Every structure is written in C-alpha cells, then in structure tokens.
C-alpha cells in the first residue's frame, strides 16, 4: 500500500539517498536540493512547501514535494493552486506501479485541500520525459502551452 509520509529524522537519510537512473538525472533535481529549496521557501514565506516520503508499506520508494501557492491579489490572471514540484521513484523501485499509485494518492490528498482551497493542480516536466507526460495525461492533466525553464506546464482543474 502506498502512503505519503512527512519527512522526519527517521526517514530523512533514506530520502536523501534515493536516486533515479543516471539517464533520468536531468528530469528531476536531487532530493537534497528539493529539501533545501523547501527550507528557503519556508523561511522567506514564499510558498508553503510540503515534502513527503513515498512509502510502499514500510519501505521508502520515492519522494514528492508539493506547494500551496496563493493567488497574487495584484495579478487578475493568477489563481490559488497546488504545485507538484518534485516527484520521483527510486531506481530500485521503478517499474512496479508505484509511480501511478503514488500520483493517485497525491491527487486524492490535494483534493482534501490540506492547506486551503485551490482551483487547480499544476506541475511541469521535461518535454522528452514521455513516461511522466503519459502518466499525467491519463490522470487528467492538460498541457497549458506554457514553458518554464524548458519544462512543459500541465494543469488539472479541481
């Protein structure tokens, strides 16, 4: 069974040690970078980051980081959204259906609006990462046509 668990002193080292296949390194930032980025956002009050270990029963198999981004009141086109910043399954655990199950669990969690209401879930990915593009499309994400730092933006309306 897949669960999302907060990062604690008990799973921190395991999460740090997770890695994707070398051919996938350009698709996702290292988990140490992601956790440092979460810290930066917390102390500077940029967004509300939510890092999680992805567990299959009691085994940590992946890492996920979400954020809650509130609407900029000065931007009429902006909206309050949940972002999926990072999503990875360790190379030793890929190909077992954990990615799909973890993403379904993530979407169900976001739909509980844990940090507040939102209109959509947004994520981005490298254009050549066709595996996640297909997964996200099957889950209802639609590419917006926007590109951020070379990554395609996709959105799921809530």
Image (cartoon, helix red, strand yellow):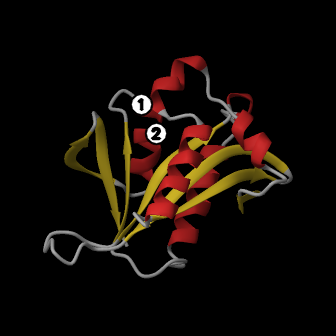
Q: In front here: 106 or 86?
A: 86
Left or right of residue 66: residue 55: right
Residue 104: x and y, percent?
57, 59
Q: Name the residue located 46 percent from the left edge and 25 percent from the top edge.
A: 26
Q: Is residue 144 above or below residue 30?
A: below
Q: Write down the quadrant of residue 5 in the picture.
A: bottom right
Residue 37: x and y, percent?
50, 48
Q: Write down the quadrant of residue 120 in the picture.
A: bottom left
Q: Is residue 92 above or below residue 55?
A: above
Left or right of residue 12: residue 64: left
Q: Secondary structure at mark 1?
A: loop
The residue indicated by pointer 2 is 132
Image quarter hosting the C terminus: bottom left
| Distance between the alpha carbons at the discs numbered 2 and 1 | 6 Å
Q: Secondary structure at mark 2?
A: helix
2 and 1 marks in contact (CB < 8 Å) = yes
The residue indicated by pointer 1 is 129
Q: Is residue 68 above or below residue 104?
A: below
What residue occupies the far bottom of the structure in this picture? Answer: 117
Tag of residue 78: none
């Amino acid at each position: 069974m897949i669960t999302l668990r907060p990062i604690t002193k008990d799973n921190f080292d395991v999460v740090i040690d997770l890695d994707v296949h070398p051919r996938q390194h350009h698709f996702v930032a290292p988990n140490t970078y992601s956790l440092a980025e979460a810290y930066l956002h917390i102390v500077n009050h940029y967004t509300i980051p939510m890092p999680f270990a992805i567990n299959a029963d009691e085994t940590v198999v992946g890492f996920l980081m979400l954020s809650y981004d509130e609407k900029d009141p000065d931007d009429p086109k902006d909206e309050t959204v949940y972002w999926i910043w990072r999503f990875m399954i360790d190379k030793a655990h890929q190909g077992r259906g954990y990615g799909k199950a973890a993403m379904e669990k993530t979407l169900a969690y976001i739909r509980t609006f844990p940090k507040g209401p939102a209109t959509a879930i947004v994520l981005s990915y490298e254009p050549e990462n066709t595996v996640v593009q297909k997964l996200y499309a099957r889950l209802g994400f639609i590419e917006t046509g926007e590109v951020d730092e070379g990554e395609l933006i996709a959105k799921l309306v809530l």
